[in-house]
Amino acid sequence: MGKPREQQNKREGGVAARRHPKPKFEVQREEQTLANPLRPLNSKQRTYMEMLESKDVIVATGYAGTSKTYLPTAMACDMLRLGRIDKIIFSRPNISNSKSLGAFAGTLEEKMSNWLAPVIGVVKERMGAGALEVALKHGDIQFQPLETIKGLSVSNAWLIVDEAEDLTVDEVKKIITRVGKECTLVLAGDITQAELGEKSGLRWFAEFVKRQNLGDIVGHVDFNNPNDIVRSDAVKRFIIAMNRESK
């Protein structure tokens, strides 16, 4: 798949960077993005960010509050604003620790928007509410139900799947075969919280990558230490306490 060279083209605005805003807006967007660079808060986040820049597929597992979803979402927003990718696609499984789609009123798009409220918050923070509204209107940011992902072909885009621990094996197979040219796929989830237990597709995929020696195209970072938690000291203490309770 040749991701490192293609990603370099994206970063440098080469052949792979096909989307270009008007010059004056391009300069303004680049200045705004460079003025607020993403910085890793620990060594695992640094490794994660490096993988997001160099691998075709990235698996992020581990505790809540470790930026498994925040970092790829923020990085994808920067790439989109700079015209280096065409779109960002968000998805998540229907089996989840949180409310199902059926619990929300409205159209499927409205349901997905409600369900993905946490990533919407990150996008607003990184791009601004106005830019988010324009991106949604133009289809540059999309919410893709898993039911319709089988026929999707993703190129020059980032596909970010949250709560991926509750994907089935078949769903993971469908998703990873959607990866086209210059596509970054992120599967983020906490395997220990999987509703599917040992049948978690994310668990299967992480083990499959090891068995088949696919580490050159698939990166995996496991935020498995409470010290990896950056959301708050309270969250860190809660997780440490819950770990003690479960032993």
Image (tube, rainbow, N blue to C red):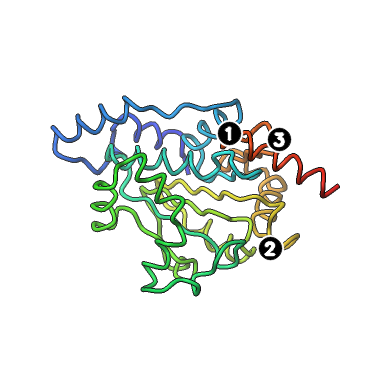
Q: Earlier in the sequence, mark 3 or mark 1?
A: 3
Residue picked out by circle 3: 225
What residue type is disc 3 on?
Asn
Residue picked out by circle 1: 230
- Residue drawn at the location 51% of the way across and 45% of the way down: 69
- Residue drawn at the location 51% of the way across and 48% of the way down: 186
Q: Earlier in the sequence, mark 1 or mark 2?
A: 2
Q: Residues within 10 Å of mark 3 (few under 14, many from 20)?
A: few
Left or right, residue 73 beside residue 193: left
Q: How crowded is mark 2: few (under 14 residues within 10 Å), some or many (20 or more)?
A: some
- Residue 107 screen position, x and y as percent: 36, 73
- Residue 182 screen position, x and y as percent: 40, 45
- Residue 246 screen position, x and y as percent: 82, 50
- Residue drawn at the location 21% of the way across and 40% of the way down: 20
Q: Residues within 10 Å of mark 1 (few under 14, many from 20)?
A: some
Give the quadrant of residue 96: bottom right
Q: Tell me, yes or no, whether the two marked residues, 3 and 2, touch with CB atoms within 8 Å.
A: no
Q: Tell me, yes or no, whether the two marked residues, 3 and 1, touch with CB atoms within 8 Å.
A: no
Residue 195's disc number: 2
Distance, label 3 to label 1, CA atoms, is 11 Å
